[in-house]
Image: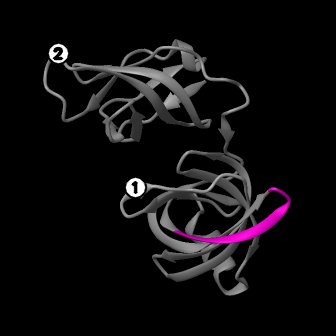
Amino acid sequence: MITVPAGSSLILRCPGTQEIVLVTLAESRAPFIADLPPIPVLSLDGPGVRRFGILELVTSSGVTWVEAELRDDVLRVLNDAPTDVVQRRSAPRKAGPYPATGTVQVEKAGARTLVAISGRVEDISAKGLLLRATADERPSLPSGIERTLLHIAMPWGDLTAAVTTVDQRADLLRGTFEWVDPAGADELRQFCRP
């Protein structure tokens, strides 16, 4: 069963405009993503405005990207998600955002280079995280990221971790922890308990 909880933040990316952050007003459930009923959302659009784009859909099963339409504060999923895009959740997650800075290791033409990044961790678990990178308030992530070293401002203090890339799309990077600072590992496990 796919569940989109009430109060979830969803991001709609439409061609030629900035990303639109939407907040779900009611829980929606269906056996498959394509079967989700129209989702009532809070948006800043007026009546009659119609937008199409790629929706970052956060569900109880994980995160996926689907085509969607926004009209009169109602969001409709237009197509089913590709099965290889869903990021399954294997551990309880805590929603962010938590500010992060760090360095990514990128492989291009057989050479490895390091690139500084900054952004925010959108969600985190004891096993990994979802990072949204920004540069001058615009989305920015180099392609081909293999590994990331991050310093994350968590509620208890700084967390330093090395992250192996699982998936990378536009300004988003989903990764699993390769290494976590031993002092922060216990705090992270306690923080992520359901």
Residue 95 in percent (x, y) is at 48, 56
Question: How far apart in space, not on screen, are marks 2 and 1 (Cα)?
Answer: 28 Å
Residue at point 66%, 52% (across, down): 143
User: Which residue is nearer to you in this view: 137 or 172?
Assistant: 137
Q: Amino acid at mark 2?
A: Gly
Residue sitting at the far left:
46
Residue at point 41%, 35% (across, down): 13
The residue that label 2 is drawn on is: 48
Residue sitting at the far front:
109
Does 16 appear above or below 157? above
Mark 2, residues whose alpha carbon is within 10 Å: few (<14), some, or many (≥20)?
few
Q: Amino acid at mark 1?
A: Arg
Q: What secondary structure is marked by label 1?
A: strand
The residue that label 1 is drawn on is: 138
- The colour scheme used to paint the residues is one colour
Q: What secondary structure is marked by label 2?
A: loop
> Which stretch did the figure color magenta?
109-117
Does 173 appear above or below 20? below
Main SS type for the magenta part?
strand
Which callout, 2 or 1, points at the residue further toward the start of the chain?
2
Does 89 appear above or below 65? below
Residue at point 55%, 45% (across, down): 170
Q: Quadrant of the N terminus?
A: top right
Residue sitting at the far bottom:
183
Does 166 appear above or below 15? below
In which quadrant of the rendered view does residue 186 lie?
Answer: bottom right
